[in-house]
Image: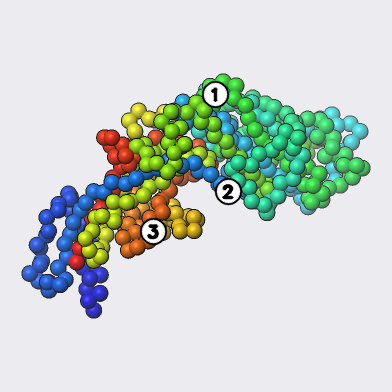
């Protein structure tokens, strides 16, 4: 019965915390004459400092994603980001026999075109790039695990064609494939005149797409590979066509690289010292940079084990002058806690109520606010503070970047406001 009474009082205090406009260290006396002395609860509010660390976001799984970024961005603060991808194409029917419909002795008018639909774009709209479409000479597998640092040696692909890539009103990128590839597919391989899907994938291992920046600061396209408009189309006999599709069973691999040679010196120092608390914290998508946050001051806050944390708000603000119009900050941030085994999991606050958890960008003061009372309660109750990682939403699709005030900043430290009850 006593535990039930304490839980009820904690819930009541939590409701009071939500409507109190400011923090006061004074003990509230309201209603104390109605409670037994052993059940009187003190409502308090404290501001705690936190520690922030800058660390590389490595070992990110990138296989079989529905969206594949390609392109290059030269960021004056974060350095250069490059994205490329590889994928398989499959027959749109179970079997194909092109020589029944196409005169293989005269391939005039037979055309093979790769078209790629992009879903998002991030970067400078004035930039131009060259897109290179390469034929893979090595296999990729749907059931294999690939990470962001996957690369192909120059002997593992051959160039088919290149084209100019610019932002435009049309969100479809179209590149013509060479005649020799048309001939190989239509006439078959080594006298083979019909294709099963398995035979075709074995013969045509897939495409590797990379880019070269020709002007401007660069941009990243997020390709919608498994959408119906991304495919390779064989057109013939004026009005006939056959689709080679990229579907959910096609192996797909995204690859990212980051070059911090020309990045800001403060950022490079933070990257080189991931175990040192930083005065700034940074976020960069596409397996770039993430921020680790710890709460060492929590252990020194309470002088009793009889504490209920009713509310805890962590606010992270962008540094003044850190934004670039063509490289907007993340629309929202998310957090995962680091488990004792080194794996990650969502915070209990997010799993309990994702909307109340927060993390959306507030344009009025250029900040992100997170509500994490359950996480802090778990830490107070004895869970190890291995840290929580803060990353941008869609961080595997868009290279969102943010430069924020850190836990040891001289004038604008990240802090967390904690409302709690002692009983």
| Mark 3 surroundings within 10 Å by alpha-carbon count, few (fewer than 14), some (14 through 19), many (20 or more) | few
Give the number of marks: 3
Left or right of 319: which side holds 273?
right
The tag earlier along the polypeptide, 3 or 1, is: 1
State the SS at label 1.
Answer: loop
Left or right of 32: which side holds 418?
right
Is there CB contact under 8 Å for labels 3 and 2? Answer: no
Is there CB contact under 8 Å for labels 3 and 1? Answer: no
Name the spot of residue 294 as percent of width and height, x first. Answer: 36, 49
State the SS at label 3.
Answer: loop
Which residue in the protein does label 2 denote? 61
Q: How far apart are marks 3 and 2 (CA)?
A: 26 Å
| Mark 1 surroundings within 10 Å by alpha-carbon count, few (fewer than 14), some (14 through 19), many (20 or more) | some
Q: Quadrant location of the C terminus?
A: bottom left
Query: Which quadrant of the view contains residue 347?
Result: bottom left
Q: How far apart are marks 3 and 1 (CA)?
A: 47 Å
Which residue in the protein does label 1 denote? 127
**Which label sits on residue 384?**
3
Q: How far apart are marks 2 and 1 (CA)?
A: 29 Å
Q: Residue furthest bottom?
A: 1
- The foreground one among 253 and 378 is 378
Name the spot of residue 392 as percent of width and height, x first. Answer: 45, 43
Residue drawn at point x = 29 percent, y = 56 percent? 299
């Amino acid at each position: 019965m006593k535990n039930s009474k304490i839980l009820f009082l904690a819930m009541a205090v939590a409701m009071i915390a939500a409507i109190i406009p400011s923090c006061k260290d004074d003990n509230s006396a309201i209603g104390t004459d109605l409670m037994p002395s052993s059940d009187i609860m003190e409502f308090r509010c404290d501001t705690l400092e936190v520690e922030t660390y800058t660390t590389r976001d490595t070992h990110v799984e990138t296989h079989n994603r529905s969206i594949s970024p390609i392109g290059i961005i030269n960021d004056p603060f974060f350095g250069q980001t490059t994205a490329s991808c590889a994928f398989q194409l499959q027959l749109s029917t179970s079997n194909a026999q092109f020589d029944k419909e196409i005169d293989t002795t005269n391939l005039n008018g037979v055309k093979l075109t790769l078209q790629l639909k992009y879903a998002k774009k991030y970067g400078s709209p004035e930039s131009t790039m060259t897109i290179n479409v390469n034929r893979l000479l090595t296999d990729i597998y749907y059931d294999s695990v690939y990470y962001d640092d996957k690369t192909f040696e120059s002997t593992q692909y051959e160039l088919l064609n290149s084209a100019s890539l610019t932002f435009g009103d049309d969100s479809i990128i179209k590149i013509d494939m060479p005649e020799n590839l048309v001939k190989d597919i239509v006439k078959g391989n080594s006298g083979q005149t019909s294709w099963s899907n398995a035979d075709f994938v074995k013969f045509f291992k897939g495409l590797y797409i990379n880019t070269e920046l020709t002007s401007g600061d660069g941009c990243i396209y997020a390709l919608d590979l498994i959408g119906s408009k991304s495919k390779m189309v064989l057109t013939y006999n004026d009005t006939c066509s056959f689709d080679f599709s990229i579907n959910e069973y096609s192996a797909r691999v995204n690859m990212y690289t980051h070059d911090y040679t020309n990045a800001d010196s403060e950022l490079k120092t933070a990257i080189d010292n991931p175990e040192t608390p930083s005065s700034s914290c940074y976020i960069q998508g596409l397996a770039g940079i993430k921020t680790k946050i710890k709460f060492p001051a929590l252990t020194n806050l309470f002088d009793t084990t009889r504490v209920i944390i009713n509310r805890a708000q962590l606010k992270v603000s962008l540094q003044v002058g850190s934004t670039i119009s063509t490289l907007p900050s993340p629309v929202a941030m998310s957090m995962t806690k680091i488990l004792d085994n080194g794996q990650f999991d969502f915070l209990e606050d997010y799993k309990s109520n994702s909307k109340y958890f927060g993390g959306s960008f507030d344009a009025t003061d250029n900040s992100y606010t997170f509500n994490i009372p359950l996480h802090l309660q778990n830490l107070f109750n004895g869970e190890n503070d291995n840290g929580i990682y803060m990353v941008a939403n869609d961080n595997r699709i868009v290279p969102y970047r943010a430069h924020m005030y850190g836990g040891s900043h001289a004038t604008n430290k990240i802090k967390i406001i904690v409302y709690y009850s002692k009983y």
